[in-house]
Image (tube, helix red, strand yellow):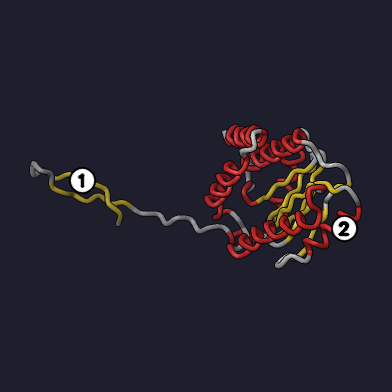
Amino acid sequence: MTKKILASIAASLVLMSLSGCVAPLIMGGAFAGGVLLATDRRTSGAQVEDQGIELRAGSRLSDVLGERAHINVTSYNRQVLLTGEVPTAADKVSAEQVVAKVENVKSVVNELGVLGSTNLSARSADTLMTSRVKAALLDAKDIYGNAFKIVTERGVVYMMGRVTQREADQATTVVRGQSGVQKVVRLLEIISEEELKRLMPAPAPQVEMKATPVMSGSGLPVTTNSPK
């Protein structure tokens, strides 16, 4: 069911992108992301910083390189991943330098390809690949799929997140098993199992119910359940 839902969302994104209506869907995704906030292992401050980094970096890259480059900026815990295409090696170096100077950036992983920009068909395929990978991670046992941020570019899947070594290895096996994946690149921050336990939300308290007799309109006792 999860796979069908995510595949449907991905298909909608592709169709809406063709009609120039991507923005509303992205906003909806951002709202849905708020629901999943509790599963994000970054601090709330780090999440806000990452959003700011992506916006500022994207704006500055646009100012420097204009429309001659296709660059995606993804920040996780202040580590920035650059994917996409630039026309020259000098542009690739320039893009990294620009992003490295953005406030709060800790490191930059430059995965830009020096080649012509991909077409809409290729980008749509990457979008669908990302959706399939996320669905597979959500369906996998002993893995918190929402702990991973997935980026796909030209069939290469990049994994970001704060996970244990066990989770990293299991997730890598799942991702490599997806049809069409050309390569898996792990940009993961490894944490201990003890730290993972501290990050997990505490279970909701159990409310014990007890029977409480009340009087009905007829004067006969009626038993209801109420919390102790």
Q: Residue at x 60, y 63 (%)?
A: 43
The image quadrant that residue 44 belongs to is bottom right
Whether residue 151 is visible, yes or no, is yes
Q: Is residue 85 left or right of residue 52?
A: right
Mark seen at residue 163 = none
- Check whether the beta carbons of the residues at disc 2 and disc 1 lie within 8 A of each other: no
Q: Which residue is mark 2?
A: 93
Q: Does label 2 or label 1 sit earlier along the sequence?
A: 2
Few, some or many residues within 10 Å of mark 1 (<14, 14–19, 20+): few
Q: Give coordinates of residue 110: x percent, y percent.
A: 82, 55
Residue type at tag 1: Thr
Circle 2: residue type: Val
Q: In which quadrant is the N terminus drawn? A: top right
**Above or below: residue 32 compared with residue 194:** above
* In this picture, residue 207 sits left or right of residue 17: left
Q: Secondary structure at mark 2?
A: helix
In this orientation, does residue 76 appear? Answer: no
Q: Which residue is mark 1?
A: 223
Gap between marks 2 and 1 measured at Cα: 75 Å
The residue drawn where x is 72% and y is 36% is 124
Residue, x 10% and y 43% (percent of image)?
217
In this view, the residue farthest toward the right is: 89
Indicate the quadrant where residue 75 lies: bottom right
Residue 193 x, y percent position in the rendering? 65, 59
- Picture coordinates of residue 118 (x, y %)? 81, 39
Which is closer to the viewer, label 2 or label 1?
2
Secondary structure found at label 1: strand
Assign the C terminus to one quadrant of the image: bottom left
